[in-house]
Amino acid sequence: MPIALIRAAILAFALALASHAWAGGGSFGNDEDSGDQDSGPPFFGFVKDKGGDAIDDAKITVTVKNLNSSMILRTDSQGHYFVRGFDKSIDPDDVDIACGKDGYREIAHARKPASDPKAPVEVDCILDRQ
C-alpha cells in the first residue's frame, strides 16, 4: 500500500475521531447526509439487555483494522449510537465495533451491512448482567 494512501487514511480517521462521532438518536436525514462523495457509510446501532431494554451510557469502541487507532463513544438514553462515515478509502469491513458496560458481558453481536456501499451499517449488541 503506498505511503501516501496510508497517510491519507490515517488523516481521515483522525479527522473522523475529532468531529464525527456522537450518540444521540439522530436520524439519517439531510442533516447527516452532506452529499460528500469522499465519505463511506455511517455506522449506527443499539445496545440492549437480553430482555430488549435499552442500555444507556454503554461504551462503544470503534476500531479501524490496520490503523491501530480507535475511538470510544457512549450510547444515549435509548441505547443508540451513531458514527458518521469514514473516508471512502477505508473499507467498511475493516471497521470493528465492540460494545460493553461495567457489570455486563456481551452475549450477542449482530452486524447488518447493506448491499449499497453508501447505506448505513447497523451493529447491535446484547449485554447481560454479570
Image: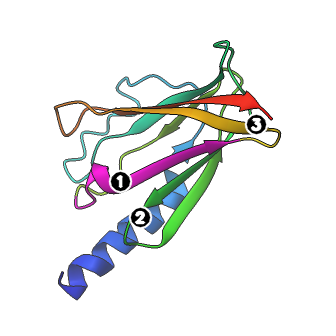
The residue carrying mark 1 is: 86
Is residue 119 left or right of 128 when viewed as pictured? left
> How far apart in space, not on screen, are marks 3 and 1 (Cα)?
29 Å
In the picture, residue 41 is in which quadrant? top left
The answer to whether the residue labelled 3 contacts the one labelled 1, judged by CB atoms less than 8 Å apart, is no
Closer to the N terminus: mark 2 or mark 3? 2
Q: Position of residue 104 (x, y in %)?
A: 76, 36
> How far apart in space, not on screen, are marks 2 and 3 (Cα)?
29 Å
Magenta stretch, residue numbers: 89-100
Under tag 3, what secondary structure?
Answer: strand
12 relative to 107, above or below: below
The answer to whether the residue labelled 1 contacts the one labelled 2, judged by CB atoms less than 8 Å apart, is yes
Look at 48% across and 59% down and name the residue there: 63
Q: Residues within 10 Å of mark 2 (few under 14, many from 20)?
A: many
Is residue 96 left or right of 77 when viewed as pictured? left
- Residue 97 magenta-highlighted: yes
The residue carrying mark 3 is: 104
- From the viewer's perspective, is the residue at label 3 or at label 1 nearer? 3
- Residue 99 magenta-highlighted: yes
Q: Position of residue 42 (x, y in %)?
A: 37, 40
> How far apart in space, not on screen, are marks 1 and 2 (Cα)?
6 Å
The answer to whether the residue labelled 2 contacts the one labelled 3, judged by CB atoms less than 8 Å apart, is no
Look at 49% across and 47% down and name the residue there: 97
Check disc 2 and give the amino acid type: Phe
In the picture, residue 81 is in which quadrant? top right
Check disc 1 and give the amino acid type: Phe
Q: What mark, if any, has residue 108 been given in the picture?
A: none
Under tag 2, what secondary structure?
Answer: helix
Closer to the N terminus: mark 3 or mark 1? 1
The residue carrying mark 2 is: 13
Look at 41% across and 64% down and name the residue there: 13
